[in-house]
Image (tube, helix red, strand yellow):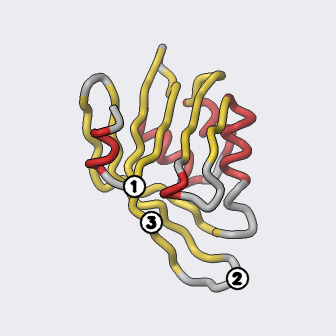
């Protein structure tokens, strides 16, 4: 399930991404990882999150370094990678996504700056 999510982000096909997300998915992006932190809810929220990269980054990818299963959740240690639209510079930001699956779909994604904070939060 997580690999399908990462592949959907890599391809940039929103429909593929939404297919693995529950209708009531919650995506939490904290201030430590974004200039525009927010809680995105449902498929409309997921679309809004994805659209937030438009005009800022091209070739946006979430590259998994490690996938761990802990306490019924999946922790994805990864890099958010892409290229600055104006600068053309390759960009990368480490993050850990805590992913909860319900009824075969991803129900919650909560981002953290590192593995220690992700584990502490849950």
Q: Nearer the viewer, residue 51 or 95?
A: 95
**In-image side of 87 versus 90 (left or right):** right
Q: Residues within 10 Å of mark 2 (few under 14, many from 20)?
A: few
Q: Which x, y percent locates residue 53?
A: 67, 60
Screen quadrant of the N terminus? top left
Q: In the picture, residue 84 is in which quadrant? A: bottom right
Q: Residue at x 26, y 25 (%)?
A: 71
Q: Which x, y percent locates residue 64?
A: 36, 53
Q: Could you tell which of marks 1 and 3 lies nearer the N-terminus?
A: 3
Q: Which residue is mark 2?
A: 86
Q: Residue at x 57, y 62 (%)?
A: 60
Q: Residue at x 48, y 14 (%)?
A: 103
Q: Which x, y percent locates residue 42?
A: 68, 29
Q: Which residue is mark 1?
A: 113
Tell me the distance, in whole angstroms, between the alpha carbons under discs 1 and 3. 9 Å
Screen quadrant of the C terminus? top left
Q: Residues within 10 Å of mark 3 (few under 14, many from 20)?
A: few
Task: Count up the numbered dots.
Answer: 3
Q: On residue 93, which mark appears?
A: 3
Q: Residues within 10 Å of mark 1 (few under 14, many from 20)?
A: some
Tell me the distance, in whole angstroms, between the alpha carbons under discs 3 and 2. 18 Å
Q: Nearer the viewer, residue 96 or 85?
A: 96
Q: Nearer the viewer, residue 110 or 106?
A: 110
Q: Could you tell which of marks 3 and 2 lies nearer the N-terminus?
A: 2
Q: Do the CB atoms of the residues marked 2 and 1 lie less than 8 Å apart?
A: no
Q: Residue furthest top?
A: 103
Question: In the displayed structure, would residue 93 be above or below residue 63?
Answer: below
Task: Label 1, secondary structure: give it.
Answer: loop
**In-image side of 66 versus 26 (left or right):** left
Question: In the displayed structure, would residue 19 be above or below residue 10?
Answer: above
């Amino acid at each position: 399930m997580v690999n399908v999510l990462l592949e959907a982000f890599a391809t940039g096909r929103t429909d593929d991404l939404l297919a693995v997300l529950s209708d009531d998915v919650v995506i939490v992006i904290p201030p430590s990882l974004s200039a525009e932190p927010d809680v995105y809810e449902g498929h409309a929220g997921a679309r809004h999150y994805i659209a937030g990269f438009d005009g800022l980054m091209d070739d946006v990818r979430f590259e998994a370094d490690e996938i761990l299963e802990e306490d019924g959740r999946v922790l994805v240690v990864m890099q958010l990678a892409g290229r600055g639209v104006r600068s053309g510079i390759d960009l990368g930001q480490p993050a850990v996504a805590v992913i909860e699956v319900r009824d075969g779909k991803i129900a919650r994604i909560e981002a953290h700056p590192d593995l220690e904070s992700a584990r502490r939060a849950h």
